[in-house]
């Protein structure tokens, strides 16, 4: 599991590790939001959470497609979110 966290800083790892309910990630451009959110989704899937139980929200259709693409690269079941 550690290799999936490679490249994340401490705050990003804290978001991925958060397990007390939903997490909201608000940060500026280029701060790694998409990487953090997609990694969190992939880790939750690997822990046994159903893809139908996960929801990632963004502002544009293109960004949503990119989030699903990145999460699916980490865990193919992400395509079913």
Image (cartoon, rainbow, N blue to C red):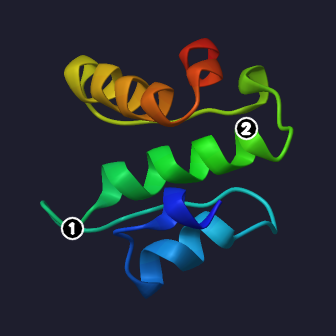
26 w.r.t. 34: above or below: below
What residue is drawn where x is 36% and y is 65%? 26
What residue is drawn where x is 44% and y is 62%? 25
The extreme left residue here reads 29
Q: Is 22 displayed left or right of 33 in the figure?
A: right
Label 1 vs label 2, nearer the camera: 2
What residue is drawn where x is 58% and y is 31%? 75
Q: Pointer 1: what residue?
A: 31
Q: Pointer 2: what residue?
A: 45
For disc 1, the neighbor class at 10 Å (few under 14, some 14 to 19, many from 20) is few
Where residue 68 appears, as percent x and y from the top left, is 43, 25
79 w.r.t. 64: above or below: above
Q: Do tag 1 and tag 2 residues touch (Cβ < 8 Å)?
A: no
Identify the image quadrant of the N terminus: bottom right
Q: Secondary structure at mark 1?
A: loop
81 w.r.t. 11: above or below: above
Where residue 59 appears, as percent x and y from the top left, is 28, 33
What residue is drawn where x is 36% and y is 36%? 58
Nearer to the camera, 16 or 61: 16
Where residue 63 appears, as percent x and y from the top left, is 25, 29
How far, Cα to Cα, is label 1 from label 2?
24 Å
Q: Quadrant of residue 2?
A: bottom right
């Amino acid at each position: 599991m550690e290799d999936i966290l490679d490249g994340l800083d401490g705050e990003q790892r804290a978001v991925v590790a958060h397990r007390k309910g939903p997490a909201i990630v608000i940060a500026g451009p280029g701060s790694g939001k998409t990487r953090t959110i997609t990694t969190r989704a992939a880790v939750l899937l690997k822990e046994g959470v159903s893809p139908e139980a996960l929801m990632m929200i963004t502002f544009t259709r293109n960004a949503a497609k990119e989030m699903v693409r990145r999460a699916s690269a980490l865990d193919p079941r992400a395509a079913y979110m």
